[in-house]
Amino acid sequence: MKSYLFLIIGMAAVTYIPRLIPLVALKDRNISKNVEEFLKLIPYTSLSILIVRGIMTADSHMTVATIVGIGVAGLISYIKGNLVLSVLAGILFSFIIVNIAP
C-alpha cells in the first residue's frame, strides 16, 4: 500500500458515521427527561471506568501518584463540575508527583 489516504478516510468514516446516525435520526424528536439525564451521565461513567481500571493496573511505585491524581480530579470535579478540567488537573498532579518526587 503506497498511500494511506484511503485507510485514513475509511477510519474517519467508520468513526464518524456511528455518531452521525443518532444525531440525524433524533434531530426532531423529543427525548424524555430520564433519557436525557442518563445521557448526561455517560462521560462521568466512562471516566470512572477508566480511573478504576488505571488503579487496578497501576504499578506499586505509582500508588501515591494514582491516589493524588484521583483525589485532585475528584475534588476539582466536585467543585467546578468540569470534566475536562478535572481530568487535566489529575494528570498534571500525577505527572508532577511521578517526575519530582524521588
Image (cartoon, grey):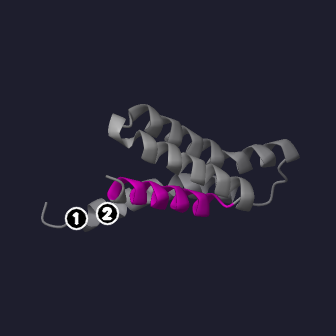
- Provide residue 57's location: percent of width, then percent of height: 39, 34
In the image, what residue type sits under mark 1? Tyr
Q: Is residue 26 visible?
A: no
Q: Is residue 100 left or right of residue 25?
A: left
- Provide residue 86's location: percent of width, then percent of height: 60, 58
Residue at image mark 1: 4
- Provide residue 12's location: percent of width, then percent of height: 41, 61
Name the residue rendered at 66%, 53% in the picture: 75
Q: Local crowd at mark 1 within 10 Å, few (<14), some, or many (≥20)? A: few
In the image, what residue type sits under mark 2? Ile
Name the residue rendered at 59%, 62% in the picture: 84
Q: Is residue 1 left or right of residue 81?
A: left
Assign the magenta stretch its main secondary structure.
helix
Residue at image mark 2: 8
The magenta stretch spans which residues?
A: 82-99
Q: Are marks 1 and 2 in contact (CB under 8 Å)?
A: yes
C-alpha separation, residue under disc 1 versus residue under disc 2 = 6 Å
**Nearer to the camera, 99 or 1:** 99
Residue 84 lies in the magenta stretch: yes
User: Farthest front residue?
Assistant: 102
Secondary structure at numbered mark 2: helix
Residue 6 lies in the magenta stretch: no
Name the residue rendered at 58%, 44% in the picture: 46
